[in-house]
Amino acid sequence: MKILILSLLTFCSSFLFAQKEKGILGDFNGDGKKEYAYTKVNDCSDECDGKCETLIYFSDKNIKPFTISPSRNGTLYNLTDLNNDGKDDIGFYPDWCTSCWHPLYVYTLNKKDWKPLVSPISTHCSQWEDEKFPIRKDPKKKGYVIITTSIWKDDDIKVISRSVKVN
């Protein structure tokens, strides 16, 4: 019986650990404590049929979850505090069934609601493969970020950067 219980505990703890690996830690509400952000997919098949929504939840239940659609899950990023408001900002790169073009969504917590910090950043998978991350603080201008985006120009994918004021 001990072996069965220990095996079950080991299995369950490894499952929980695997689930947490898909999330991120950060101080998203500015209270000085780290929260855990994680995703859950709502109604989406492997072929991207259905609602295809990704909900972003937080271990602190006082932080309101929000939804990205269309999305068949994706990757969360702790972008640190891009707008100098004392809270870590969140990036979300959605997964989808077609195309290599996906936006990076960037959000900040404004009181109780999540709002876009900048417009969605258009990216192509080649930009990610070349490790050209789409957003970072502009070291020369307070309140600005450097946006690195993919564009189609002259029959090719070009990666360009520009400084943008945060919302």
Image (tube, helix red, strand yellow):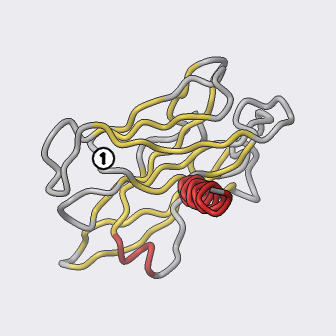
Which of the 4 quarters of the picture holds residue 84? top right
- Picture coordinates of residue 166 (x, y %)? 60, 39
Q: Is residue 146 visible?
A: no
| Furthest-front residue in this view | 1
Give residue 20's position: percent from left, percent from top.
60, 53
Q: Quadrant of residue 96?
A: bottom left
Residue 109 image position (x, y, % from top left): 63, 29
Q: How many marks?
A: 1
Q: Which residue is mark 1?
A: 71
Which quadrant of the figure contains the N terminus? bottom right
Q: Residue at x 56, y 23 (%)?
A: 64
Q: Give the residue displayed 57% in from the left and 33% down from the top.
A: 167
Q: Is residue 28 left or right of residue 132?
A: right
* Residue 90 vs residue 74, the one in the foreground: 74
| Residue under the point 18% across and 50% down | 45
- Observer-nearest residue: 6 or 14? 6
Q: Which residue is rendered at x = 28% and y = 62% of the image? A: 101
Against 79, residue 39 (above or below) is above
Lateral position of residue 120 relative to residue 50, left or right: right
